[in-house]
Image (tube, grey):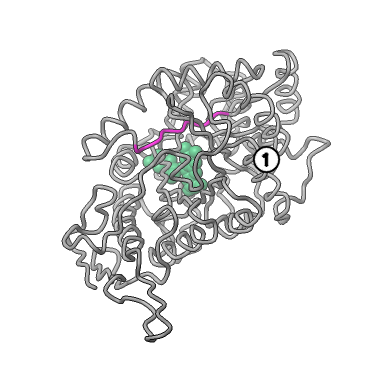
Amino acid sequence: MPRQLVLNAFIHDVGHHEVAWRLPETRTDVQRDVTYFQDIARTAERGKLDSVFFADSPSTFGSTVARRPSEILEPALLLSAMAVVTERIGLIATSSTTYEEPYNLARTFASLDAISKGRAGWNVVTSADLTAGANFGYTEPLGHAERYARAEEFLEVVLGLWGGWEDGHRIADKANGVFHDPAKVHALDHVGEHFRVKGPLNVGRSEQGHPVVVQAGSSVPGIALAAKYAEAVFTAQPTLEEGQAFYAELKAATRKAGRNPDHVKILPGLVPIVGSTVEEARAIEKSLDDLVVLERPLAALAEQIGVPADQIDLDAPLPTDIRPASEIEGNRTRYELIVALARREDLTVRQLLLRLGGGRGHRTYVGTPEQVADTIQEWFTSGAADGFNIMPAIYPSGLETFVDHVVPVLQDRGLFRRDYAGTTLRDHYGLPVPAPLGAASGAGVGASSGGAAATTERTA
Ligand SMILES: Cc1cc2nc3c(=O)[nH]c(=O)nc-3n(C[C@H](O)[C@H](O)[C@H](O)COP(=O)(O)O)c2cc1C
């Protein structure tokens, strides 16, 4: 079997283009309609996609990130409703290591993994939206380095809790009144700088062991965290060369961390705008761009770069005297990427804002199904991607077009499955099932992901 693409559908209510909601055919009430999201999951499954994914923040996403404040239902809850109407599609939700507690998070995702019979994934983020801190008692936003230090210990605890149950713990011997074997359920006894967690978790292992660990930060500490723990990485490289450089860097870091680089799937974002001819695809893009009102995105950009909006000329290049990336405490990598994009392509501020409106810095590709398949194939076969985070500009029609017109081309080229070979998310991504940690005395928490926490002891 030749190497197969991983395709993940990044769900963003009515589409990743910021004005998709203004199209005449777009519904504006989907955020609270679970059947809408269930239909999207069914469409992704019809296309044999690996997974669907929700980004998230425990906030309304501050003005620097979202140009369209919207209701956002809690993603793991929403995915559990999607799990019951599907059988194969993987279900990935974002949850924050900065604002959650590891015990609660481990339990939520282990529950989703149980409900879906081994199809859950957790997108680990340190939360790029700095306004979220005010919802959790912080008067100052937590800094980048501090968030990543907490994230590492958080992951050790979650993996330790997930690893605490051995298979065969349930005996259910009715005749002798023995329900389970307590020697197979292990406490964690974690004592660290940020957390004290005794354990064990009150949910055991699933069909895939535990949820797949996904990660989405690309700064230096972000890559270090991914190398140590991530099994899939969402990223946003706009050019093939940058994609190749990031891919090589992360695979090398993974090898250095003592892990098999094939066990971390690198998935750049791709916003496909597909038409049966190039002209048709361009017309779709234009119909969206024509609806963009630049006032709010300009204000958001002004805030990010540290230049008052009234001093920015929309038809001139990005000002040169802007805030350095090192001062960005939120989404530092995306900031660097946006500035590099503007400079590399010599974009005016207006052109830059239109580009960002299409996919927030992710790569947009406008073309026919064959052309979209060509670019996917090129990145996949030239060391830039293991697959893609597919981000339709318009939902649900963009996903339907991708499934009905691009997926068959990829299948005909032998790059993508015609049917699921397994039932779990690990099966789809080609990831190993992690062993329970409890049995391996002294193995240390995080052993399944190559880490070891000196401060954690495991007790039966
Ligand atoms: C595809 C993708 C999805 C992301 N989803 C989220 C998200 O749901 N919530 C969030 O706070 N950050 C999200 N991020 C941002 C990162 O997780 C991270 O917080 C941000 O990039 C800052 O970390 P960095 O400086 O290491 O890149 C996402 C990034 C990418 C590439």
The answer to whether residue 328 shows anywhere in this view is no
The image shows residue 351, relative to residue 361, as above or below, that is above
Q: Residue at x 82, y 37 (%)?
A: 25
User: From which residue to which does the magenta span run?
Assistant: 263-270
Q: Would you place residue 123 above or below residue 199 in this image?
A: above
Q: Is residue 26 above or below residue 411?
A: below
269 to the left or right of 285: left
- Of residue 22 and residue 281, the one placed in the foreground of this image is 281
* Element on which disc 1 rests: helix
Task: Note whether 390 is above or below 12 in the view shown.
Answer: above
Few, some or many C-alpha atoms within 10 Å of disc 1 (few <14, some 14-19, many ≥20)?
many
- 398 within the magenta span: no
Q: Quadrant of the C terminus?
A: bottom left
Please give the residue where the numbered disc 1 appears in the rendered image.
43
Residue 450 on image: x %, y %:
24, 47
User: Percent position (x, y) of residue 345?
Assistant: 51, 15
Of the 4 image quadrants, the one containing the N terminus is top left
Which quadrant of the figure has residue 327? top left
Where residue 243 appears, as percent x and y from the top left, is 41, 24
